[in-house]
Image (cartoon, rainbow, N blue to C red):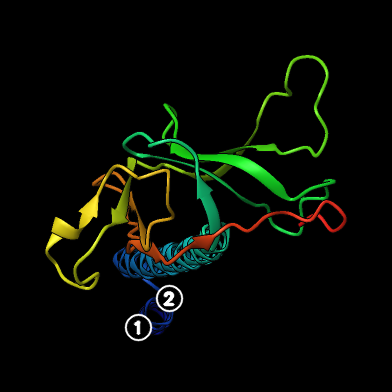
Amino acid sequence: MSRPVVRRVAAKGQQAGFTLLEMMVALVVLGFLMIGLTQGTRFGFVAWKHQADAVADHDQMDALDRTLRQLLTQIELRGAGTQGELNFTGTLPMAVALGTRRADMDLQVNKDHQLVLQWTPRAHETELGPPAPPTTTVLLSGVERMDVGYWTGGDPGSTDSAGWNDQSNATEVPKLIKLTITFPAEDRRRWPPIVVAPAALGPEDPANPQ
């Protein structure tokens, strides 16, 4: 009479546990859940980094846009200028702590695809010895080229480029100067042309240098 009782106990024990197949299915489901969680977290970090980079690029280019517009507000062109380069005498920003803020400047893209500003302060007195080398400030990296246009007439808002020349007349300040910064095709940055209406740079007062 004891044998049927043993069989019922064994059957009851089998129902209370998990089979190997059930354990494998549970592990597979858990693995898929972990993969989905990992991919979702990775996508979130990539999207956050992309947004942070875009905001940083926008802030950098916005600050550079304001700086270039300030530099070109009052200028005196030096020479006829070469294509893709702007040579002028202007006023340095207030942050430059020198005896004078007036300087000879060259804005160009160098061989390392950097937009650079080379500037040499204009001293009030005649310097003895060789002139000091210009200071080079890197404004932006990863630039394909820079095109400079000078407006000579016509409607500046027109798509017709007949009113724009790539060579300046050093005897007078152009009515408009247009800077077009071009990036490589694979670069996500895009920058609309900077158009500035400059004014002639007046004489500097030695008692109150700009």
Q: Nearer the viewer, residue 38 or 27?
A: 38
Between the residue at mark 1 and the residue at mark 2, the CA separation in whole angstroms equals 21 Å
Left of 202 or right of it: where is 160? left
Q: Quadrant of the C terminus?
A: bottom right
Q: Nearer the viewer, residue 150 or 32?
A: 150
As displayed, is residue 26 above or below residue 85?
below
**For residue 63, which numbered disc appears in the image?**
none
**For residue 4, which numbered disc appears in the image?**
1
| Location of residue 174 in the rendering, given as x and y in whole percent from the top left corner | 38, 57
First in sequence: mark 1 vs mark 2: 1
Residue at left offset 84%, top offset 58%: 208
As displayed, is residue 119 above or below residue 37?
above
Quarter of the image holding residue 146? top left
Residue at left offset 83%, top offset 18%: 128
Tag 1 near tag 2, CB within 8 Å: no
Residue at left offset 44%, top offset 64%: 54
In front of the other: label 1 or label 2?
2
Name the residue that disc number 2 marks.
Answer: 17
Quarter of the image holding residue 175? bottom left
Outermost residue on the top side: it is 129
Q: Please tell me whether mark 1 sits on a helix, a strand or a loop.
A: helix
Left of 114 or right of it: where is 186? left
Quarter of the image holding residue 51? bottom left
Q: Please tell me whether mark 2 sits on a helix, a strand or a loop.
A: loop
| Location of residue 154 in the rendering, given as x and y in whole percent from the top left corner | 19, 68
Q: Quadrant of the N terminus?
A: bottom left
Q: Nearer the viewer, residue 197 or 28?
A: 197
| Location of residue 88 in the rendering, given as x and y in whole percent from the top left corner | 52, 44
Q: What amino acid type should be assigned to the residue bearing mark 2? A: Gly
